[in-house]
C-alpha cells in the first residue's frame, strides 16, 4: 500500500477503473471512470466535499507494480473500495478497511468517529468482513439501473405542449442551466442562497464532457426547466447519467423521461451499448425504471461508529 502521489496516479486509477468495469461484465462493483472524473471536478471542486483529493486516496500495487486496488472517499467518512477481481483476497479487504478506519473516518465535535463503507449486494465476502468488524447495514442504498443499447425500441417520451428537448447551448446558457440545477436539487432553499453559475465551468472541464450529451428541456419561455448529462466512455462503450433533474415547477410534464430517452438515442448513435444511472429516492428510481427497464442492483451503505 502507498498513498496517492501525483497526477500520474490519477490517470492510472482512471485506466484501472475501466479495466475493472470490463472484467466485472460492466456491472458497477467499482466506480466507472466517468464517476471518478465527476467526483474530482464537481463533488470535490464545486461541492467542496473534500479540501483536495491527494491526502484521501490510497493505492495497493502488485509486486510487478500493477494496480490491485484503490481506496477513496466520496465525502468525509464515506469510503469506496475499488478492487481488481483477480486480486481480491480477505487479507486485502481487511487491510483496506484498516486504512479506511485509520485515515478516512469522520470525527464529530465529541470525538466520535464514524465511517461508511459501500458494498455491492452480491459481494457476500465484503459484507461478512464488514459485519465482523462491527459495521451495520445503513439506509439509502444506491439503486444501480442499467439498460443495454442493442437496437431494441426505446420508450416513448411525450412532453407537455410548448416544451422541447435539445442539447445545451453555448456558454451564454450556463446561467440558466445552473439555475435549473439549483432549483431542481434545492427546491426548499431561499433564492438568496444561490451562489452563481461559474461552477459549471468545472463540469465542462471533465475529460468526458460532451455538449451534445448535455441534454436540457426548454420551457415555453425559453429558459431551461430540466436536464440530464451523460458521460460517454468509448473504451467501455458505456454511458453514465449524472445528474438528472427537473425544476419542481416543471415536474409531471414528462420532461425527466424525455431528456433521458433523447440521451439514450444519442448514446446509441455514438456506438454506446450500455447506459447506467444510480438512484436513491423512490421518485428517482421510479423514473429510472420507466426508462431503463427492470435490470437493477443495489450498492449498500455499511456504517460503523466508535
Image (tube, grey):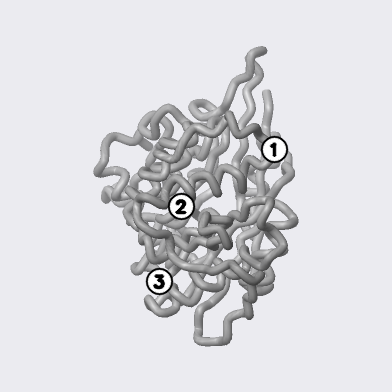
Q: Which quadrant of the view contains residue 143?
A: bottom right
Of the residues under marks 1 and 3, which one precedes in the sequence? 1
Q: Residue furthest front?
A: 221
Q: Secondary structure at mark 1?
A: loop
Could one spot residue 71 in this view of the protein?
no
What is the number of callouts on the image?
A: 3
Q: Which element carries disc 3, helix, strand or loop? A: loop
Q: Residue at 59% x, 57% y: name it.
A: 278
Quadrant containing the C terminus is: top right
Q: Nearer the viewer, residue 60 or 261?
A: 261
Q: CA distance from mark 1 to mark 2?
A: 27 Å
Task: Determine which residue is flagged by label 3.
Answer: 237
Task: Return the residue at label 2.
Answer: 35
Point out the tag, 2 or 3, that comes first from the N-terminus: 2
How many angstroms separate mark 2 from mark 3 (CA)? 15 Å
Q: With 18 as the anchor, is 274 left or right in this view?
A: right
The answer to whether residue 46 is left or right of residue 179 is left
Task: Tell us which disc is closer to us: 1 or 3.
Answer: 1
Residue sitting at x 37%, y 61%: 211
- Residue drawn where x is 72% and y is 62% of the image: 252
Q: Residue at x 44, y 68 (%)?
A: 238
Measured from the top left, where is residue 155 in percent x and y? Answer: 62, 79
- Dividing the image into 4 quarters, which one contains the N terminus? top left
Position of 246 with respect to 14 (left or right) is right
Residue at the far bottom: name it: 152
The residue singled out by tag 1 in the image is 188
Q: Earlier in the sequence, mark 1 or mark 2?
A: 2
Say left or right for 149 vs 289. Answer: left
Mark 1 neighbour class, 10 Å CA radius: few under 14, some 14 to 19, many 20 or more: few
- Residue at mark 1 to residue at mark 3: CA–CA distance: 38 Å
Amino acid at each position: 500500500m502507498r498513498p496517492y502521489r501525483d497526477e500520474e496516479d490519477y490517470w492510472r486509477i482512471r485506466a484501472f477503473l475501466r479495466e475493472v468495469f470490463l472484467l466485472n461484465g460492466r456491472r458497477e462493483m467499482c466506480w466507472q471512470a466517468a464517476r471518478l472524473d465527476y467526483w474530482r471536478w464537481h463533488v470535490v471542486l464545486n461541492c467542496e466535499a473534500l479540501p483536495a483529493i491527494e491526502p484521501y486516496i490510497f493505492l495497493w500495487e502488485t509486486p510487478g507494480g500493477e494496480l490491485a486496488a484503490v481506496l477513496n472517499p466520496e465525502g468525509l467518512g464515506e469510503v469506496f473500495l475499488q478492487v481488481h477481481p483477480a486480486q481480491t483476497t480477505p487479507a486485502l479487504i481487511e487491510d483496506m478497511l484498516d486504512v479506511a478506519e485509520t485515515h478516512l473516518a469522520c470525527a464529530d465535535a465529541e470525538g466520535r468517529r464514524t465511517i461508511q463503507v459501500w458494498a455491492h449486494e452480491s459481494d457476500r465476502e465484503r459484507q461478512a468482513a464488514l459485519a465482523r468488524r462491527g459495521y451495520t447495514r445503513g439506509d439509502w442504498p444506491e439503486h444501480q439501473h442499467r439498460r443495454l443499447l442493442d437496437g431494441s425500441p426505446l420508450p416513448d417520451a411525450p412532453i407537455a405542449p410548448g416544451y422541447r428537448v435539445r442539447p445545451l447551448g453555448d456558454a451564454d446558457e450556463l446561467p440558466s442551466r445552473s439555475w435549473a440545477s439549483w432549483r431542481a436539487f434545492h427546491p426548499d432553499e431561499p433564492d438568496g442562497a444561490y451562489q452563481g453559475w461559474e461552477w459549471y465551468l468545472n463540469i465542462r472541464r471533465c475529460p468526458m464532457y460532451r455538449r451534445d450529451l448535455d441534454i436540457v428541456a426548454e420551457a415555453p419561455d425559453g429558459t431551461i426547466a430540466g436536464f440530464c448529462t451523460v458521460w460517454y466512455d468509448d473504451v467501455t462503450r458505456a454511458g453514465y447519467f449524472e445528474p438528472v433533474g427537473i425544476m419542481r415547477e416543471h415536474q409531471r410534464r414528462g420532461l425527466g423521461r424525455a431528456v433521458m430517452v433523447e440521451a439514450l438515442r444519442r448514446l446509441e448513435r455514438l456506438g454506446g451499448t450500455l447506459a447506467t444511472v444510480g438512484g436513491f429516492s423512490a421518485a428517482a428510481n421510479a423514473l429510472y425504471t420507466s426508462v431503463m427497464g427492470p435490470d437493477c442492483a443495489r450498492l449498500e451503505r455499511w456504517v460503523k461508529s466508535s
